[in-house]
Image (cartoon, rainbow, N blue to C red):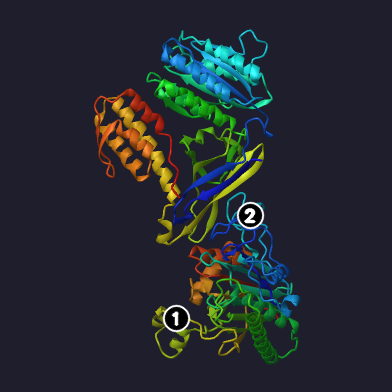
C-alpha cells in the first residue's frame, strides 16, 4: 500500500507550498485553494496547462493507489485550538501542521508511538507503524523507518515501507509452543518484512512524485527497525541506524540493535569509540533499504524477558541527543514517572525533549510497556 | 465597484530570541467612484471659514473666492452647508432662518450659496471648538448622509475658547465627520489644527499666500468628492499573548493610529481610516510576539481592510525564527524607509521646538539629523523646507548651522510638512 503525498505546487514558481496557504512563501503569489488530486494533476498535464502543476507520472499505479494530500491536522499542535484561517491557528498563530508533521499511534493502551518533523526539517521523512492486541504484553508489532533526506521522495518511501512491514508481520502470528521455533519464525518474518518494505521503496523509485527539488539521481531510501513482542519473547531486526532498546525496570539498559553506521564499523575494527563517533562520517549509514542498497537483509536479535520494562524503538532524531543506553534509560525512567507510565504521553514528552535539544532531525519514538511476566 | 488590495513588505526572518516584527502593509483602492454615488449612502460637505476680525482685506477676499471655488467642486446631489466661524459659529448657508440645515447641491443652491459667501465679513474672535460642534449638529440633521467631510480654514489661534473647551469639542465630534484643516498666514498654531486633523482623520497644511487658497480648496473638495468609499476600517489581529506595539499610517502622511484602536474581540483591534478614493496608503505595523525556537514559524499579525463589515482585503505578517545571520540581519527596504520617515518627522518637530525655546544646541543637532535622514530617504520636499531654516554644510552627515532671522512662515511650513512622507522608490 503505497501512499503518494502530492504536495501543492505553486503555479508561479514551482516551489512546494502547503494546502491552506494563501500566498506562496517562495514568490508571494496567491495560491489557488484547490487540492491537487491525482486526477486533476493528470488532467492538467494532459491538457498541457502552462505551469499549472507538476504532474506525477500517470501510470497504472495511479489508478490503483490514490494520491492523497497529507491532510492538515484539525487541532493546533501548539495550543490545542481548533480554528484555522489561511493555514494559521486563530488563537496562537502557529501554522497548521500537516498530520504527517506530528502524529500519534496508539493501537492499545500499552503501546504507542509519536512521529514528529522536528524543528529544522521542512517535512517529516520518518514514519512509524504499529499494531497490538489489547491484552498488555501479549502481542505487538512496532516499526520505524527513517527516510534518507538526500534521496528521492524519502517521505513516501518511509511511510509505505513501515506500513508494508507492519502489515506483513501481523499477517502470520505463530502460536507454536517452541521458543526456538518462534525465534526462527519471527526472524524469517522480519526478513520478509524488510523485503516488503524494500519493495515499497523500489515501487516509489518507479513512480516518482516529480515534486520539484527531489533528488532524482538518488533512489528512495530509508532505514528500518522493527520489533515483535510475542509474550515474553522480543525479536527485533534492523537495517541502518534506527535503534531498538530494552530497558528492564531492574537491570542494565540494553541497546538491542547495532547501528549499521561507519562509526560502529570502525569501532568493531578497533578504533576507539570516541574517535569514531567524532569523525565527520560517523553517522553515515552503511546499510539501508532502497534500490541501490548493498544488503537489505536485517540483522536480528532476540531476548526473552524475565521481568517488567520498556521496549523502545526510535530514529536517530531521538538517540542523537542521548546515545548511551544507560542515559536514555534514565531519561525514559524520569519521563515515565512524570507521565504516570502512559506510553502515549511518554512518547510525546520524549519528542518534546528532543525538540528542546534542537530538533535537528525528524523524531520517531515507539514504546511498549511490558509488565511482569505471568507465571507459567 | 471599489476594490482593495493589500501587500505586505517585511523581512519575516528574525533571530533566535527576537520578539519584534515590523511590516509595511500597503493598501490600494481602485474603482472607488464618486462620493455618495455608491452603495455607501449619500455624501455631505461643510465648508467652515474663519471670519474673525484678523481675516481682513486680502485674507477674507481670498476666503470668499476659495469658498466659491469649493462650492463649484461639490457634486450635484451632495448635501452641503457653509459655516462662518468667529467666537461663535453661525450657519451662513442655508440661510440662518432656512427650515433645513443642509440642502442638496443643484444649480439654484449653488448660486444662492455663492451669494451668501460673497457677504462674508471679517469681524469677531476665534472659537474653533464651537465651529466643530455646529458642523456635527448640521451633519446629524441628514442621517442618510453617511459620508461626511468638512474643510476648515482659520488664520489665527483659538483665542476665544479655553483649551479645555476646545479639547472636549474635538472629542465630542471625533468619528462623526472627517475634516481637513488649513491655516492661512503665520498667526495660527500648527499644533491646534493638527489636533483637529488627527482626531478627525484629516490633513493639516499651511497656505502661505492667500492667493493660493482657492486652488487648495478646489483640490480638497475634488479629492473628497472622489472618495467613493465612505468608510474603511483597518483591523489588526495578533495571536494570544502578542502585543501590537503600534499601527501607524506612514504614507501619504504620518499618523499614529494606535490610540484610535477599538477592540473588536480580545485579539483584534479596529482602526478607522475614513473615506477612500482611488489611492494607496501605507501602514507600518509592529507586533511583539513570544519568541519560538529556531525553525518555528508564527503568524504575527493579520491586517484586514473592512468596508461595511465585509473584509475586502488582507495581508499576513509572519515571523520565522532563523539561526542564519544572512537572513535575519536584512531590513526590508520599505520598513527601513518608513522607519526613517517617522524619525524624520520626530526630529523636525523636536528641533523646531528646541529652537523656539532658545536651545540652539539641541535644535542644531536635531535639525541636522533631519537633514541627513531627508537626504537618505530622498525626501526632497523636507530637504527644501529644511534649507529655509538651516544652512546645510554636509547633507550626508547632517552638519548644519541654524539660520538667523528665519521667517515664522518658513518654520511653520517645515512643521506642517514634517508629517508628509515620500513613498518608497520601487
B350 up-or-down from A339: above or below: above
Percent of width and height locating residue B46: 57, 21
At mark 1, the secondary structure is: loop
Percent of width and height locating residue B49: 50, 17
Percent of width and height locating residue A198: 64, 84
Which mark is on residue A80?
A: 2
B287 up-or-down from A133: above or below: above
Nearest the viewer among A138 and B59 is B59
Q: Quadrant of residue B133 in the image?
A: top right
Label 2 or label 1, whichever comes before in sequence order? 2
Q: Quadrant of residue B17 in the image?
A: bottom left
Percent of width and height locating residue B385: 34, 33
Is residue A193 rendered to the left or right of residue B426?
right
Which mark is on residue A66?
A: none
A3 up-or-down from A12: above or below: below
Q: CA distance from mark 2 to mark 1?
A: 39 Å
At mark 2, the secondary structure is: loop
Evaluate whether residue A341 shows in this view: no
How many labels, in total?
A: 2
Give the residue pinned by disc 1.
Answer: A282
Amino acid at each position: 500500500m503505497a501512499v503518494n503525498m502530492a504536495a501543492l505546487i505553486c503555479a508561479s514558481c514551482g516551489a512546494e507550498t502547503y494546502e491552506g496557504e494563501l500566498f506562496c512563501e517562495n514568490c508571494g503569489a496567491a495560491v489557488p485553494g484547490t487540492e491537487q488530486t491525482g486526477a486533476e494533476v493528470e488532467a492538467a498535464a494532459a491538457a498541457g496547462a502552462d505551469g499549472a502543476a507538476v504532474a506525477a507520472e500517470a501510470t497504472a499505479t495511479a489508478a490503483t493507489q490514490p494520491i492523497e494530500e497529507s491532510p492538515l491536522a484539525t487541532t493546533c499542535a501548539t495550543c490545542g485550538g481548533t480554528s484555522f484561517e489561511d493555514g494559521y491557528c486563530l488563537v496562537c498563530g502557529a501554522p497548521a501542521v500537516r498530520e504527517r508533521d506530528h502524529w500519534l499511534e496508539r493501537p492499545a493502551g500499552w503501546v504507542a508511538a509519536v512521529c514528529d518533523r522536528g524543528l529544522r526539517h521542512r517535512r517529516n521523512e520518518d514514519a512509524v507503524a504499529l499494531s497490538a492486541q489489547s491484552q498488555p504484553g501479549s502481542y505487538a508489532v512496532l516499526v520505524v523507518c527513517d527516510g534518507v533526506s538526500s534521496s528521492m521522495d524519502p517521505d513516501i518511501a518511509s511511510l509505505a515501507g513501515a506500513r508494508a512491514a507492519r502489515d506483513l508481520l501481523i499477517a502470520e502470528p505463530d502460536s507454536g509452543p517452541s521458543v526456538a521455533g518462534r525465534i526462527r519464525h519471527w526472524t524469517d518474518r522480519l526478513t520478509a518484512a524488510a523485503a516488503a518494505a524494500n519493495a515499497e521503496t523500489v515501487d516509489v523509485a518507479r513512480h516518482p512524485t516529480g515534486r520539484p527539488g527531489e533528488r532524482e539521481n538518488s533512489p528512495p531510501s530509508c532505514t528500518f527497525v522493527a520489533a515483535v513482542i510475542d509474550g515474553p519473547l522480543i525479536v527485533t531486526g534492523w537495517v541502518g541506524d534506527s535503534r531498538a532498546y530494552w530497558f528492564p525496570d531492574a537491570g542494565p539498559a540494553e541497546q538491542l540493535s547495532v547501528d549499521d553506521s561507519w562509526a560502529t564499523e570502525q569501532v568493531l575494527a578497533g578504533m576507539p569509540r570516541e574517535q569514531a563517533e567524532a569523525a565527520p562520517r560517523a553517522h553515515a549509514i552503511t546499510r539501508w533499504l532502497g534500490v541501490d542498497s548493498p544488503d537489505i537483509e536485517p540483522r536480528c536479535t532476540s531476548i526473552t524477558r524475565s521481568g517488567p520494562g520498556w521496549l523502545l524503538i526510535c530514529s536517530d532524531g531521538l538517540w542523537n541527543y542521548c546515545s548511551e543506553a544507560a542515559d536514555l534509560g534514565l531519561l525514559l525512567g524520569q519521563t515515565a514517572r512524570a507521565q504516570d507510565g502512559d506510553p502515549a504521553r511518554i512518547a510525546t514528552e520524549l519528542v518534546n525533549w528532543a525538540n528542546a535539544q534542537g530538533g535537528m532531525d525528524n523524531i520517531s519514538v515507539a514504546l511498549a510497556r511490558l509488565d511482569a511476566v505471568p507465571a507459567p | 465597484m471599489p476594490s482593495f488590495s493589500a501587500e505586505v513588505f517585511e523581512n519575516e526572518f528574525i533571530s533566535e530570541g527576537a520578539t519584534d516584527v515590523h511590516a509595511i502593509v500597503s493598501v490600494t483602492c481602485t474603482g472607488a467612484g464618486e462620493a455618495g454615488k455608491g452603495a455607501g449612502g449619500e455624501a455631505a460637505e461643510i465648508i467652515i471659514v474663519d471670519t474673525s476680525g484678523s481675516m481682513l482685506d486680502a485674507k477674507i477676499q481670498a476666503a470668499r473666492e476659495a469658498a466659491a471655488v469649493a462650492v463649484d467642486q461639490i457634486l450635484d446631489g451632495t448635501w452641503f452647508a457653509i459655516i462662518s466661524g468667529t467666537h461663535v459659529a453661525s450657519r451662513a448657508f442655508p440661510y440662518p432662518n432656512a427650515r433645513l440645515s443642509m440642502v442638496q447641491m443643484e444649480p439654484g443652491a449653488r448660486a444662492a450659496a455663492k451669494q451668501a459667501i460673497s457677504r462674508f465679513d471679517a469681524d469677531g474672535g476665534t472659537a474653533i471648538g464651537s465651529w466643530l460642534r455646529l458642523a456635527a449638529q448640521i451633519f446629524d440633521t441628514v442621517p442618510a448622509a453617511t459620508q461626511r467631510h468638512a474643510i476648515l480654514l482659520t488664520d489665527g489661534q483659538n483665542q476665544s475658547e479655553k483649551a479645555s473647551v476646545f479639547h472636549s469639542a474635538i472629542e465630542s465630534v471625533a468619528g462623526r465627520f472627517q475634516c481637513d484643516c488649513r491655516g492661512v498666514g503665520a498667526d495660527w498654531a500648527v499644533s491646534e489644527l493638527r489636533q483637529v486633523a488627527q482626531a478627525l482623520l484629516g490633513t493639516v497644511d499651511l497656505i502661505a499666500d492667500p492667493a493660493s487658497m482657492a486652488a487648495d480648496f478646489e483640490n480638497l473638495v475634488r479629492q473628497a468628492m472622489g472618495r467613493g468609499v465612505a468608510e474603511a476600517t483597518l483591523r489588526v489581529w495578533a495571536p494570544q499573548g502578542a502585543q501590537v506595539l503600534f499601527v501607524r499610517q506612514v504614507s501619504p502622511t504620518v499618523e499614529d493610529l494606535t490610540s484610535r484602536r477599538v477592540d473588536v474581540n480580545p485579539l483584534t483591534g479596529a482602526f478607522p481610516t475614513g473615506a477612500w478614493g482611488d489611492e494607496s496608503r501605507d501602514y507600518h505595523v509592529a507586533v511583539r510576539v513570544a519568541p519560538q525556537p529556531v525553525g518555528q514559524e508564527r503568524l504575527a499579525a493579520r491586517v484586514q481592510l473592512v468596508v461595511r463589515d465585509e473584509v475586502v482585503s488582507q495581508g499576513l505578517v509572519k515571523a520565522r525564527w532563523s539561526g542564519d545571520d544572512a537572513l535575519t540581519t536584512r531590513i526590508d527596504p520599505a520598513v527601513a524607509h518608513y522607519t526613517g520617515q517617522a524619525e524624520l518627522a520626530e526630529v523636525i518637530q523636536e528641533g523646531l521646538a528646541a529652537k523656539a525655546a532658545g536651545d540652539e544646541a539641541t535644535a542644531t543637532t536635531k535639525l541636522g539629523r533631519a537633514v541627513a535622514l531627508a537626504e537618505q530617504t530622498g525626501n526632497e520636499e523636507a530637504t527644501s523646507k529644511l534649507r529655509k531654516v538651516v544652512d546645510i554644510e554636509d547633507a550626508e552627515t547632517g552638519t548644519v548651522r541654524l539660520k538667523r532671522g528665519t521667517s515664522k512662515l518658513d518654520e511653520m511650513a517645515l512643521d506642517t510638512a514634517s508629517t508628509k512622507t515620500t513613498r518608497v522608490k520601487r
